[in-house]
Image (cartoon, grey):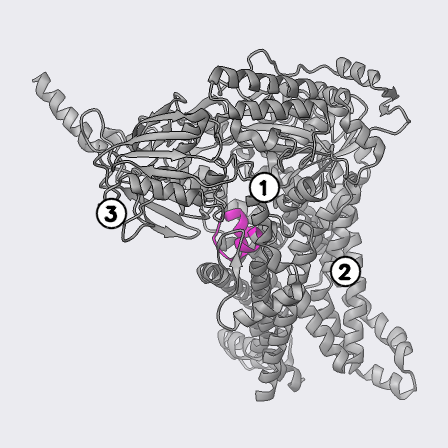
Amino acid sequence: MSIAKRIACTVVIGAGMLAALAGLLARNSYARQFREAIDARPSLQFPLGTDELGRDRFARLLWGTRVSLILAPAAALITTLLAALIGGSAGYLGGRWERLVLAATDLFLSLPWLFLLLAVRALLPLNTSPYASVFLTFLLLGCLGWANPARIVRSATCTLASSEFILQAKASGVAGLRLFWLQLAPNLRPVLMAQFWIAIPVFILSEANLALLGLGVSEPVPSWGGMLRELENYTAVLHNPAMLAPLAMLVAVVSGLQVLLGTEETSAC
Amino acid sequence: MFLVVVRQLRRVLLTTLVAGLLGATLVRLSPGFGIDEREMDSRLNRESQSAARAEHTGERNIGAFYLRYLDNALHGDFGYSLALNRPVAEMIRERLPVTLVSLGYGAGFGMLAGIVLALATVSAQSVPLNLISSAMSGLCLSLPAAVIALFFLWTGASGRWAIALAVFPHVYRYSKNLLTEARRSAHVMAAEARGVRPARVLLAHITAPVLPQLAAVAGVAVSLAFGSCIPVEVLCDSPGIGQLAWKAALARDLPVLVTITALVAILSVAANSFADLALAPWRAAK
Amino acid sequence: MLRILCVVLSAASVMAQSDGQLRLALHTDPKTFNPLMVEDESSEIIRYLTGGVLIRRNRLTQELEGELALTWRVSEQGRRIEFQLRPGVLFSDGTPFSCPDAAYTLQQLMDPALHSPAGDSFRSTPGSIEALCSGPASLSVRFPGPVAALAGRFDQVAMLSAHSPHPESAVLGAFCVREYKPGEYVQLEHNPNYWKKDANGKQLPYLRSIRLDIQQNREIELLRFRRGELDVISKLDPEMYERLSAESKTVVDAGPSLDWEVVFFNQVSQAPLPSFKRGWFRSTGFRRAISEAINRDDLRRIAYRGRAQAASGPVSVANRFWLNAALKPQAHSVADALHRLEAEGFHRMGDVLLDREGHRVEFSMITNAGNKRHERMLTLIQQDLAQLGIRLNVLTLDFSSLVERISRTYDYESCLMAFTNIDLDPSDQMNIWLSSAANHQWNPNQKIPQTPWEARIDELMEAQAASTDPARRKAYFDEVQQIVAEQAPMIFLVHPDVLAAVSANLRNVSVAVVGPQVIWNAERLYFGPALVSHR
């Protein structure tokens, strides 16, 4: 493993451990408001200072890491499975089904997905807990993110379907679902794994973008995206650079994942 | 080739029509549809508030609305925005150039930066350059488009550069991978062994064979750029289609959303079709 | 020598006063340039700057002053108003203004098919008006029913031209619209035929033009103000106020505004709520306890950075005449709140509050998404109520979804909202306090008042609307405020302060609480002689 990958591995695992041990490492609850210490600078009591409601930024960062690091992979898994099913079948079956799937992906990419998120949020039951709400948001993101990966999976399946070992398998009498399951699917695994790992940072960033548009996790549950909204007040950031901690964490983890992936983008579509 | 182009055009048209209908249905069925902010104006009496609600009656039957919309659209009339109190066509005409310029800058500079840096990295074969380029692209990939937009906001620069930074890392990585693979091919080694100048090797033997694939990345660049448009235009207050889409989504403005959905469909399908057309000869050769 | 110097300086001052372009931001595109159809803030600002009115409320003194009307008289218990119009006034295109134009404007305004917000405020009774001219400068208007605070309502009615060849561009205000570029700006130029002159006989306005840039993003607005590209920011955020103040920029805190931040509970009988929750929300004791548990001082100090005042009711201290001074903001006391809840049959079990039937007291509060101040307030209230053992779930919704829930489906439990008041007179709030009205937010559109206190409020509001005696009207509305304080159908939290940032070059600025707060005297604003900006 190269030095870069080792560092990346350390960063990602480190972030994961911080998230897992949030309850132990954070002295204060993420929701507790120290109303006499609003916008406090870093100190022993508050390693990253407090936010505009007097909440411990360090505690919120640790708990927010949980939200992103647990839910983003879950959403990525949903996306990858959907992409495997839809893209794989399109590439394997070809013909009309393939054309239909390609049309469906084009269609899917055109729909106002942001609007769908607004609508889902508005449909949530009133007393939905913040965790349930963010879970549903990531679930929806996962269900919406299949289109581009499906195209890549379809492309890879097409390439594999015309390879020599498949021809040999067909010649040996293997066909249909068995051929797909025994011969194609194992060879698709690297592509699927790559798509899975690529999707994780995409969903982390999607949550951050949504939060900056006011569609993030409900209070008081923290998330990286929700904490990034503080950056809109740049004078405050200059006054207290600790406010950049969530951004630094986000960049470090996403960069680490990118390095660990080791997979470059190999397809334009 | 002619048949291929016709098929792609048909694909664009069908997708646009279906996308428009699905988009309209999504809006129509969503919570908050038909709500007028005048209902919260305590100066208005009951009759005026009822009249405000009644203005949305024509949009309730989605089938009838869409047929009427298509019929009018053929005459250049894309409906009237009740929320913004202006004809949709007028707003699109004003805002589309702003977005196209942002997309042009964003996708264009993103692609230029990505491809040029990839070429430099592949030709120089320098470890520090490779590291710096990878770090830059990694950083841009790790930052949400909205945060990049905020940084430009702070400096007073235009948000379109945020779009460029969102596009650049994807183009860079894809191009670098492509060019690196091309560099390893036998004919390149042969050319180098024969003493061909490095510049000529780079242009004629490495880049030229993968030009169709590099061209295909334009489709992806445009899609990526458009995806970054909404958060960037909203945060940077750029009066483009992205900002209009956001306002229309909040107001459940049906004619505006249907028109923008159709525009996005045309754009993304056209971009993907372009990519397919560009790659078709290469795939055929393979 | 000194005398010569004074004359020179005075001349220079006058010359400099007549130059300059004022630049400020509108936060949305104006929806209309038709002054009769103005609903949104941007259109209202343009109407204010370009429209000539018969009577204007001085934003600073809050007194009515004649503008295009020299004098006026209200009679027949508020059914009739007679004006003596100012002679020699011209529209911006040079056509004369006279009584037929005023009559025409009022006929247009009161057309029921127009659904004009300004017109609706005159429409206390169905029927048409009689607007008669007995001479070019004498106008008599008779309404079908009495109109409360009749004279003051003309502040919102900009006169139209009945005869101009270009009526849409003929205005009587200090400025006229020269250019509108959607999404970018509205350019106003001074009206060369404006009737008003200053004490020295110089024609107003002093400013050459006003440029209204369309800027939704407040951060960009702030950046541009810092760079000197904007001269005024009105409705400044408290955080921005702090930042500019720290940079020694000219910022103004004009004290509490007329606006309210309130919480209300869903008391609609057909709302899809469990019956036990409906019972909570309908209990005065429950609402009062919630009000006591909310720490208004923290809301003021934290969410508003101290730039707000705790509210005692729907009238802020800025509304000097209508304020019921006997009322005080609800004091924060968790102990008192718990006491009150116990009296209603609630009890604590550990950290959890339970009702009489053993249900855990948990409910949701909705507000509009994207409003950071509301989100902060909700989070503060969430913690306050946690001290009582109440679990508050906060949900931010986009505006359309929010309005649908509170005014159509009634599928909500409680709501945090801001109310903007543009007028001082409580008659403007009829649609909030009348139980049959659509904006009687906690339980709208009642066929008959469902509680005795709502019935009493109905009587009082109708009585104050029918009376022309200010003292009597005040007494009625004082009682309304008292009832609201006792019954707490709306829990009044704070009145945000009026905050503005003004360029150091800009002279004659006096920030008022009634909008437009900074540019209400735009015709008298000018840039200081030493630093005239040439744009």
Note whether residue C513 is visible: no
Which mark identifies residue A79? 2
Crowd band around label 3 with a 10 angstrom C-alpha radius: few (<14), some (14–19), many (20+): some
Q: Nearer the viewer, mark 2 or mark 3?
A: 3
Mark 1 or mark 3, whichever is nearer to me: 1
Name the subunit of mark 3.
C
Q: Which mark is residue C93?
A: 3
Point out the frontmost of discs 2 and 1.
1
**In whole angstroms, how far apart are the C-alphas of marks 2 and 3?**
64 Å
Q: Say if C340 sits above or below B60 in the image.
A: above
Q: Amino acid at mark 1?
A: Arg
- Circles 2 and 3 on the same subunit: no
Give the left or right position of residue C534, taking residue C26 as reference. left
Residue at the spot x=55%, y=30% of the render? Answer: C429
| Relative depth, front residue between C183 and C475 | C475
Residue B16, x across and y down, in percent: 61, 71
Report whether C83 appears left or right of C449. left
What amino acid is found at the position of numbered circle 3 in the picture?
A: Asp
- Which numbered circle lies on residue B46? 1
Q: Magenta segment, which residues?
A: B232-247
Provide the secondary structure element on which disc 2 rests: helix
Q: What is the chief secondary structure element of the magenta stretch?
A: helix
Q: Are marks 2 and 3 in contact (CB under 8 Å)?
A: no
Please provide percent x and percent y for residue A150: 74, 68
| Residue drawn at the location 64% of the way across and 70% of the way down | A268
Residue type beneath disc 2: Thr
Residue at x-position 85% and y-position 21%: C346
Q: Secondary structure at mark 3?
A: loop
Label 1 SS: helix
Q: Using the numbered discs, state the Cα–Cα distance from disc 2 to disc 1 in whole angstroms.
A: 49 Å
Q: Is B6 covered by the magenta stretch?
A: no
Q: Is residue B246 magenta?
A: yes
